[in-house]
Every structure is written in structure tokens, then in C-alpha cells.
Image: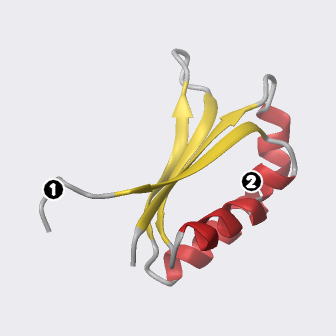
Amino acid sequence: MPSFVLIGHDVSESAELRKRYRPAHLEGIEGLEAAGRIHFAGPMLDAEGQPLGSIILFEARDLEDARGIAARDPYVCEGVFERHEVREVRQVLPRT
């Protein structure tokens, strides 16, 4: 199954929104993790160690499926992210 990356860039002052939607956000990601489809998920941090966005590296059937997964993420649909993108990626290293 191909791999995709969701890169989300937070709105300014996203701390309260992140707190509010984090449980639902994690629930969706944990569903993918349980299915063995998550390679990495976590926040991007600013110089002070505060979240300013997120990266999720996951497997999906195709780009349409990956975009659908992203569109259902509460951080996307509830406005935590100012903008986001979903791209197919190919692993080069480490070699599998």
C-alpha cells in the first residue's frame, strides 16, 4: 500500500483548538495505527517547543483515499489547521 504525508499548518493561537479537538484527532489516528497504517504522527514545534502544525505519515489505497482520511481529521475539519496538504511519498531510507 502506498504511503502519504499529511502536513498541517496551524492557525495562529491554535493551542485552545488543539486541546478541544485532540481526543477526537487521536482517536482517528489510533484507528489507523491499529490497522498498521501509521508510520509516524506528531506535532511540528516552534523554537519554544510549542506545536505549530502536524505531520502524519500513513498508508492509504491511493491519493483519493488519503485525502479522504485527511478531510475527516478533526484538526482539518474543525479549523486547527490554517492549511494542509496531502502528498504521496516514497521511502528510500532506511532500506526495507
Residue 64 picture location, percent across and down: 62, 69
Image: 18 above or below 95: above
Quadrant of the snapshot with the N terminus: bottom left
Residue positioned 31% across, 58% down in the render? 90
Residue 61 picture location, percent across and down: 51, 79
Say whether disc 1 or disc 2 marks the residue closer to the N-terminus: 2
Residue positioned 61% across, 78% down in the render? 31
C-alpha span from label 1 to label 2:
31 Å
Q: Nearer the viewer, residue 23 or 5?
A: 5
Assign a secondary structure to mark 2.
Answer: helix
> What residue does disc 1 label?
94
Assign a secondary structure to mark 1.
Answer: loop
Q: Nearer the viewer, residue 11 or 27?
A: 11
Left or right relative to 73: residue 8? left
Nearer to us: label 1 or label 2? 1
Quadrant of the snapshot with the C terminus: bottom left
Question: Which amino acid type is shown beneath numbered disc 2?
Answer: Arg
Specify few, some or many for label 1: CA neighbours under 10 Å numbering under 14, 14-19, or 20 or more.
few
Residue 77 figure quarter: bottom right
Residue 40 picture location, percent across and down: 43, 57
Residue positioned 77% across, 65% down in the render? 72
Residue positioned 76% across, 50% down in the render? 75
Left or right relative to 17: residue 86? left
Question: Which amino acid type is shown beneath numbered disc 1?
Answer: Pro
Q: Nearer the viewer, residue 23 or 36?
A: 36
> What residue does disc 2 label?
22
Image: 66 above or below 20: below
Residue 68 picture location, percent across and down: 70, 68
Image label count: 2
Seen from this angle, which residue lies furthest top? 47
Seen from this angle, which residue lies furthest bottom? 35
